């Protein structure tokens, strides 16, 4: 039955009940509420949250570290790349920071455990 999974442990990068500050939405809970209303869903999964977080990182990094993008595509790519590479802030995804291999090293994955309730 449903108790067979009790006390199992797992890990991941994000869950809709994790609370982080966010520069666009205020916090992750606000994003979850808005996304549920917008998409007509009852929960927000890992992939949609990751897509929203990517948009937050691009927008916020350009605001903090970017400059006028202009029309030259090569220059625009350079500005966007440098802005994202300079990013080191808390978002709905948790802390986002990129290492020299351009991998998000802002935080480790989190562990969770299934507990019986009731």
Image (cartoon, grey):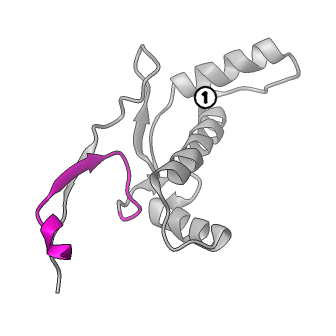
Q: Name the residue beneath numbered marker 1.
A: 65
Up/down of 53 relative to 78, above or below: below
- Of residue 97 and residue 103, the one placed in the foreground of this image is 103
**What is the total number of numbered labels drawn onto the structure image?**
1
Look at the image and tell me in which quarter the C terminus lies: bottom left
Coordinates of residue 77 in the picture (x, y in percent): 72, 19
Q: Residue at x 19, y 65 (%)?
A: 114
Helix, strand, or loop for circle 1?
Answer: helix
**103 falls in the magenta region:** no
Determine the residue located farthest toward the right in the rendered image: 71
Q: Which residue is depicted at the point 11% across and 63% down?
A: 7
Residue at far left of view: 7
Viewer-nearest residue: 112 or 87: 112
Location of residue 20 by image quarter: bottom left
**Quarter of the N terminus within the rendering:** bottom left
Q: Examine the rendered structure and indicate whether residue 97 appears above or below residue 113.
A: above
Indicate the position of residue 101 as horizontal and vertical percent values.
43, 15
Q: Which residues are magenta?
A: 1-17
Q: Is residue 109 above or below residue 46?
A: above
**At which x and y percent is residue 11?**
25, 47
Whether residue 11 appears in magenta in the rendering, the answer is yes
Percent x, y of residue 91: 47, 48
Q: Residues within 10 Å of mark 1 (few under 14, many from 20)?
A: some
Q: Pick the residue in front: 51 or 30.
A: 51
- Residue occupying image coordinates x 14% and y 58%: 8
Q: Is residue 41 left or right of residue 18?
A: right
What residue lies at 43% left-to-right and 37% top-to-bottom? 96
Examine the image and state in which quarter residue 69 appears: top right
């Amino acid at each position: 039955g449903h108790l067979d999974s009790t006390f199992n442990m797992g890990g991941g990068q994000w869950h809709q009940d994790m609370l982080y500050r966010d520069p666009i939405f205020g916090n992750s809970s606000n994003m979850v509420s808005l996304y549920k209303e917008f998409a007509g869903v009852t929960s927000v999964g890992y992939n949609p949250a990751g897509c929203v977080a990517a948009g937050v990182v691009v927008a916020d990094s350009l605001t903090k570290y970017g400059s006028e993008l202009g029309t030259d595509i090569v220059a625009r790519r350079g500005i966007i790349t440098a802005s994202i590479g300079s990013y080191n802030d808390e978002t709905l995804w948790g802390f986002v920071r990129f290492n020299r291999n351009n991998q998000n090293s802002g935080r480790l994955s989190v562990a969770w455990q299934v507990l019986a309730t009731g």
